[in-house]
Image (spheres, grey):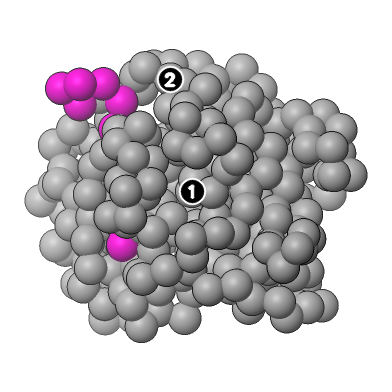
Amino acid sequence: MALAINSDIVNTPPVPAATVMVVRDGERGLEVLLVRRHANSGVLGGVHVFPGGKLDAADRQVAAAALDRPVADCLQALGEADLDAGTAVGLHVAALRETFEECGLLLGLQGAQGLVARLRQQTQNGTAFGDAVQALGLVLPVSSLLPWSRWVTPRVPSVTNKRFDTRFFMAVAPSDQEAEHCTFEATEAVWLSPRAGLERFWAGEIDLAPPQIMSLCQLGGLADVAQVQAAARSRAPVLIAPEPFDVDGQRVICYPGDPSHSCADRAWPGPTRLIYRNQRFEPDGGLAALFV
């Protein structure tokens, strides 16, 4: 299913959201979890993405005592001067919740495999995720999440008709839990090396949206989980505000550091723009341009 270009101008504020790059050390090195969104999904149907979704009201209402780290630490980790503490906590909770709902993983918890079914039953009965975790005698392991980047959809979203303000986190997959895709929202959950993910995208075997393409490009330069964690801890989350424009009828999305972007400081090595051709977004220079 190829991506379709959207040229609508969306003036509403972007919706806060969270997504998680769940990583593990595989036999051949670093692997990251991707889920294929259901074809009927209202956002990026059929596309392989990292687990995640929008911030729910209940995510903001989790008490400080239910967290495994102080609220102030959640706020500081995101590095946003204008962010309130409730939203900072909510984004962490949303990241944990969405990963559980879409993949059945309880991040940050070892020996919790037997609790997955009990937690799923409670949440399916309408209990808020945070409340359900507390009812099992657990705290919410927000410390397992390391902020990675922040993506703000431009007023011309290009691949959707919605805008999101998405905080990307990274987290290590619990070694004793198996990822299982949610049959309602997704049709596949797959572990791939960043390179393999980009190669499968280039071969037309999977579809990726621009944020996933660029994030896999970043991860591709890291050998294992320890390097990903070190990279996340070494800097504040980078702000990515893509800027789209059309050239000769082709949509171009440029990123910080590109000559056409308003921010001259490059956010990462590798391509600074993607161009819509062959019914997808790809860089000049082909597949090799994504390996830095």
Position of the N terminus by quadrant: bottom left
Nearer the N terminus, badge 2 or badge 1? 1
* Image x and y of residue 251, in percent: 69, 62
Residue found 71% across the figure and 77% down from its top: 7
* Image x and y of residue 61, in percent: 57, 65
* Residue 280, above or below 109: below
Q: In terms of secondary structure, where does tag 1 sit?
A: helix
Kind of residue indicated by mark 2: Leu
Residue found 31% across the figure and 74% down from its top: 38
Examine the structure image and report whether residue 33 is included in the region drawn in magenta.
Answer: yes
Most foreground residue, 110 or 276:
276
Most foreground residue, 20 or 6:
6
Most foreground residue, 202 or 265:
202
Residue position for label 2: 222
Q: In this view, does 91 lie to the left or right of 41?
A: right
* Residue 116, above or below 3: above
Q: Is residue 9 left or right of residue 215?
A: right
- Magenta residues span 26-36
Q: Residues within 10 Å of mark 2 (few under 14, many from 20)?
A: some
Residue position for label 1: 212
